[in-house]
């Protein structure tokens, strides 16, 4: 793509292999028409979407085993959309959202790269209501609370787009908004449930948490700023409330996959074109990296580690002074 360099990586989740195109590094910026700037994305934030972060890898692994039967999924802040691709391959109903101007073409390309239909996508600004998006049974996100207001804004997204009986799954890296977000969701009737899955091994990944919230019914005291959900022409945004039988009104416009020029090209890539792209990539010296092969181990808090007795070898080393 013009304006930045990319690389191909492999992610292993749930026994499946996914090929993903990501940015080569974080030192890239391309916003020739100022679209990103108008959305409030600075040059330092621009490339954050184009990587597969540890929390995104963990969310993809969680979604590879998550119960999908009869559920509609919404990924908030999808980035390159690894978790959405996992759900798409499993046959789940999923819509991916992000605000970054390059998220849609990257998601479309990665869908084609894995032989999947393009994941339905909507651009979503957390500060601007989008009632036509509808409501979902499960909202998922990974490492999205990295600014001071993100916990509050994300809770508002949940309030606008979660069904009465809904779940929220968030892989969090502990940047500071976890407590506030938990309290805000409890005010909406959600309860934080224990999660037994372990995070990927590695020093930088040991702080990751899987936050799984569940709500059995929508509290009456939580106001709905947009009224009941309306049918938007897409089965993922069905109304969860009974409507009165009144005169027929024009149907809302269906959810459209409005691709940019680069996104349209990526959405219609054939398998031969993908193979050609990979072959050219390798000829130019490109290297396909493999992720997701690190062993899983249960998370152990610092307090628990202090209480754990030292291994015999370490204890002996201390006594001998080695």
Image: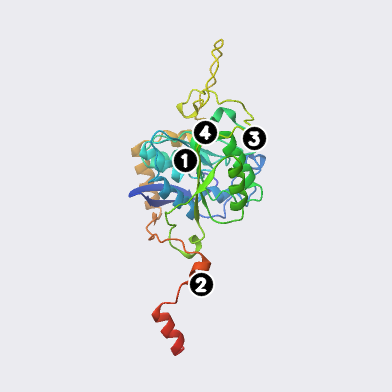
- The Cα–Cα distance between marks 2 and 3, rounded to whole angstroms, is 46 Å
The x, y position of residue 286, in whole percent, is 41, 54
Residue at the image point whose x is 40% and y is 36% from the top:
92
Q: Is residue 68 above or below residue 301?
A: above
Q: Are marks 4 and 2 in contact (CB under 8 Å)?
A: no
Judged left or right of residue 131, residue 304 is: left
Residue at the image point whose x is 51% and y is 38% from the top:
104
- The Cα–Cα distance between marks 1 and 3, rounded to whole angstroms, is 22 Å
Foreground mark, 1 or 4? 4
Foreground mark, 2 or 1? 2
Residue at the image point whose x is 44% and y is 44% from the top:
83
Q: What residue does disc 3 label?
A: 128
Q: What residue does disc 1 label?
A: 107
- Label 4: few (<14), some or many (≥20) within 10 Å? many
- Label 2: few (<14), some or many (≥20) within 10 Å? few
- The Cα–Cα distance between marks 1 and 4, rounded to whole angstroms, is 25 Å
Per the rendering, the mark at residue 163 is 4
Secondary element under disc 4, as helix, strand or loop, is strand
Secondary element under disc 2, as helix, strand or loop, is helix
Q: Residue furthest top?
A: 247
Q: What residue does disc 2 label?
A: 306
Q: Residue furthest bottom?
A: 320
Q: Earlier in the sequence, mark 1 or mark 4?
A: 1
Judged left or right of residue 122, residue 38 is: right
Query: Nearest the camera: 292 or 241?
Result: 241
Q: Earlier in the sequence, mark 4 or mark 2?
A: 4
Quarter of the rendering occupied by the C terminus = bottom left
Foreground mark, 2 or 3? 2
Q: Are marks 2 and 3 in contact (CB under 8 Å)?
A: no
């Amino acid at each position: 793509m013009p304006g930045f360099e990319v690389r191909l990586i492999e992610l292993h989740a749930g026994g499946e292999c996914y090929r993903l195109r990501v940015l080569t590094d974080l030192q890239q910026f391309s916003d020739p028409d100022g679209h990103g700037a108008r959305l409030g994305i600075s040059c330092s934030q621009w490339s954050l979407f184009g990587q597969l972060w540890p929390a995104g890898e963990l969310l993809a692994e969680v979604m590879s085993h998550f119960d999908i039967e009869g559920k509609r999924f919404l990924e908030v802040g999808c980035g390159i959309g690894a978790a959405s691709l996992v759900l798409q391959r499993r046959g789940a109903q999923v819509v991916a959202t992000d605000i970054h101007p390059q998220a849609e073409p990257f998601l479309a390309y990665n869908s084609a790269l894995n032989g999947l239909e393009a994941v339905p996508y909507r651009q979503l600004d957390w500060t601007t209501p989008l009632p036509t998006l509808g409501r979902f049974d499960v909202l998922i996100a990974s490492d999205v609370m990295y600014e001071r207001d993100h916990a509050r804004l994300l809770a508002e997204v949940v309030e606008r787009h979660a069904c009465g009986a809904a779940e929220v799954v968030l892989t969090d890296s502990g940047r500071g908004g976890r407590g506030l977000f938990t309290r805000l969701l409890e005010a909406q009737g959600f309860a934080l449930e224990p999660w037994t899955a372990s995070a990927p091994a590695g020093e930088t990944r040991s702080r990751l948490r899987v936050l799984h919230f569940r709500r059995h019914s929508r509290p009456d005291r939580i106001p709905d700023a947009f009224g009941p959900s309306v049918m938007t022409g897409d089965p993922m945004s069905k109304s969860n409330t009974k409507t009165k039988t009144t005169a027929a009104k024009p149907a809302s416009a269906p959810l459209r996959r409005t691709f940019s020029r680069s996104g349209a090209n990526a959405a219609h890539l054939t398998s031969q074109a993908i193979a050609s792209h990979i072959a050219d990539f390798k000829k130019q010296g490109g290297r396909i990296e493999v992720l997701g092969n690190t062993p899983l181990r249960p998370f152990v808090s610092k307090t628990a580690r202090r209480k754990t007795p030292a291994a015999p070898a370490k204890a002996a080393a201390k006594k001998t002074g080695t």
